[in-house]
Amino acid sequence: MPRIQPVGRTPHISIHAYCETPNLAASMQRAASDRRLYRATCDIRAGGISAAIAEYRDSPTPDLLILESAAAREDLLSILAKLAPVCDSRTKVVVVGTSNDIALFRELVAGGIAEYLLAPVGALTIIGAVLRLFPEESGTRLGKIHAVIGAKGGVGSSVFAQNLAWTVSHCTHATLLADLDLQFGTAALNCNIDCPTGFAEQLPEVDRLDGALLERLLFKRGKGLSLLPCATAAHIASDPDMATIEKVLDLARCAFPHVVLDLPHAWSPLVRSSLLAADDIILVAEPDLANLRNARSLVDFLRQSRPNDPPPRLIVNRVGVPKRVEIPPQKFAAALEVPLTAKIADDPVVFSAAAANGQMISEFSRKSAVTPTLEALAGQLTGMTARKKRKGLWGFWGGRAS
């Protein structure tokens, strides 16, 4: 009798599997290549639960953690208790074991384990478990929108948005970068993507726009970053209907945990609507008087329009340009009455070389001074701090830890 096929597709999630046997490793490989899990980023490793504990002492856990163990009941419960302090609360854990014991299953679920699978496990069983735990476009898993805007043209906000999106995508989060500078966007150019026609020109009427159509407009950059780019060859394009852009953002946050918007420095309905829809706003400015004036206007608008939201995150870029009279970054932030998130030193050699190669800064030079800034901000936006100890499997596991 043929096996029942699981129905649906996963959202963009990260999956790590720690396998003790070749059987589970092979099943995970088949599951990872299945059409229903094509949005998921899968990392299959050897070593079982002990290897997972060692790994996550200093790094964040993924959306889904699959752990294989042939240990008996008491030993299994004991080692899982050691996993609890290093596991994020958002992470769902699936255990693959050899004990066919309903009492063990109930004890595991009561302790925070999402699912227990009896070995040997086939690919369809894994796919079905993933789809149950992460249903497609679940209303409870809406992603966050992070809008990046410059206080003035040419301050480097687009380059910062592109590098931020790339960094977030490497924090175990699938990420969408939407280039909303529809006339002169540079995301495709800087990511070395050939895009003859921008996404905005291909959008249908709002009532015909859905997730499947949006996915056909995406370009991939590495395993975790997707792009909605403008045309590579700059040309004048008209802004689409605002209802269409709002639908694009709604669909994007249903499919991606994090959406980074690269906004142009132009006060338009598109920019205003995007700023009001964003969960976080990153304001990029250079330390001079014109930037301070423009930033003040933008901050005042945000305070009035988003009274219950925190102020924008201020990035003072290109600090230390030779022979330029500058406002010290701390005084710049104080004048705006917002905290200074970061300052970035002027480094034209690294930035221009990376752009010429179609690379992100961290790809071109891990030693660049901007890399720690991007990683720190990505951690703040995603809520993941690499070296922070976390207790995610509450209650039972915490009580059993020795």
Image: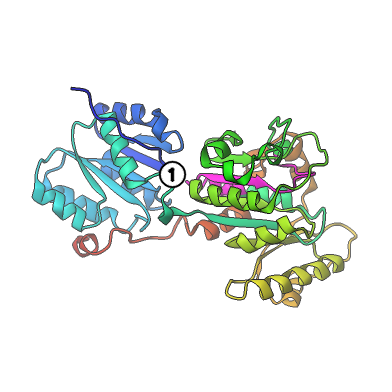
Does 64 sit above or below residue 140? above
The quadrant holding residue 389 is bottom left
Q: Nearer the viewer, residue 218 or 366?
A: 218
Image coordinates of residue 22 in percent, x first then y, are 26, 27
Image coordinates of residue 380 in percent, x first then y, are 54, 60
Position of 91 with respect to 348 (left or right) is left
Secondary structure found at label 1: loop
Q: Nearer the viewer, residue 139 or 82?
A: 139
Residue beneath the point at 71% across and 37% down: 198
Q: Residue tagged by mark 1?
A: 13
Q: Nearer the viewer, residue 186 or 96?
A: 186
Q: Amino acid at mark 1?
A: Ile
Outermost right residue: 323
- Residue 296 belongs to the span the image colors magenta: no
Position of 331 with respect to 2 (left or right) is right
Residue beneath the point at 25% across and 27% down: 23
**Number of numbered discs:** 1
- Residue 186 belongs to the span the image colors magenta: yes
Q: Is residue 217 visible?
A: yes
Q: Is residue 369 visible?
A: no
